[in-house]
Image (tube, grey):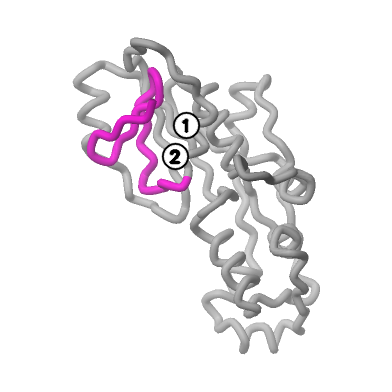
Amino acid sequence: MCQKKLEMQIFSHIVVDLCKNDFLSPYLERQIPEEADARVSCAVRIATDAHQGAEDPAFDDYCAEHGLPVATIACPAVIGTNMNGLPRRIAAGIYRGTFVHIRDNGARMSVIHATDVARAVSRVAGAEGTFTLHDGCDPTIHDVAEALAFRMAEKRIITLKPRWARLWYGSEYYNILTSNHLLENSFVEAFPDFHPADTLNYLRTHVYDESSL
């Protein structure tokens, strides 16, 4: 059962600092089974690009007070219901009809689905250190946008030449969309038995129902 203590949340025997990524809470509730009379024995912090510097000091104090091993999962771009960061910005643009592809844009980004982040919390619990996590596929931003559009009743995204796209987006967002957002995958290296799903394939093939996130 999830219990709140300031910005921390406790899932069974794991205390988690979501770093304001509250959209992950329902995924954790589904992935980590309740244990009767479970005692908190380890801690996990989830860090994304959307909330850099949002670590909860009370989490650190709690872990130090109880001598808990702390594992940090760094996963900059998480895709899931109510996601944040760059994936949310892209999805919002698609929904509003303001997102356009940039012709010949080969920029890539490392992504992970929220379901696998929740699975990773269970797997890393009890370890110490910082582990970067993504699905290992590094899709293009073009393909990320198309997969998100597919989930929105297959919305159509037009393509503009780079100079027109720069005028459309402005330099700041244009530079973000034409830059690589890649990272290592030290989580999978440390836990070779952990196999995250291909995030974009999940978006295109998962059958969503009333109980899905």
The CA span between labels 1 and 2 is 6 Å
**Magenta stretch holds residue 18:** yes
Whether the residues at callouts 1 and 2 have beta carbons within 8 Å, the answer is yes
Q: Residues within 10 Å of mark 1 (few under 14, many from 20)?
A: some
Which residue is located at x 69 percent, y 63 percent? 152
Mark 2 element type: helix
- Quadrant in the rendering for residue 154: bottom right
Q: Which mark is residue 29?
A: 1
Q: What residue type is disc 2 on?
A: Ser
Relative to 111, 43 lies left or right: left
Mark 1 element type: helix
Q: Position of residue 77 (x, y in %)?
A: 56, 51
Q: Which mark is residue 197?
A: none
Q: Is residue 176 above or below residue 126?
A: below
Q: Position of residue 86 (x, y in %)?
A: 55, 61
Q: Residues within 10 Å of mark 2 (few under 14, many from 20)?
A: some
Residue at the disc numbered 2: 25
Q: What residue type is disc 1 on?
A: Glu
Q: Is residue 157 above or below residue 68?
A: below
- Quadrant in the rendering for residue 43: top left
Question: Who is closer to the viewer here, 38 or 20?
Answer: 38
Q: Position of residue 38 (x, y in %)?
A: 36, 12
Which residue is located at x 62 percent, y 42 percent? 212
Question: Who is closer to the viewer here, 46 or 189?
Answer: 46
Q: Position of residue 135 (x, y in %)?
A: 67, 40
| Magenta span | 1-23
**Magenta stretch holds residue 4:** yes
Which residue is located at x 32 percent, y 13 percent? 39
Q: Is residue 141 above or below residue 212?
A: below
Q: Quadrant of the C terminus?
A: top right
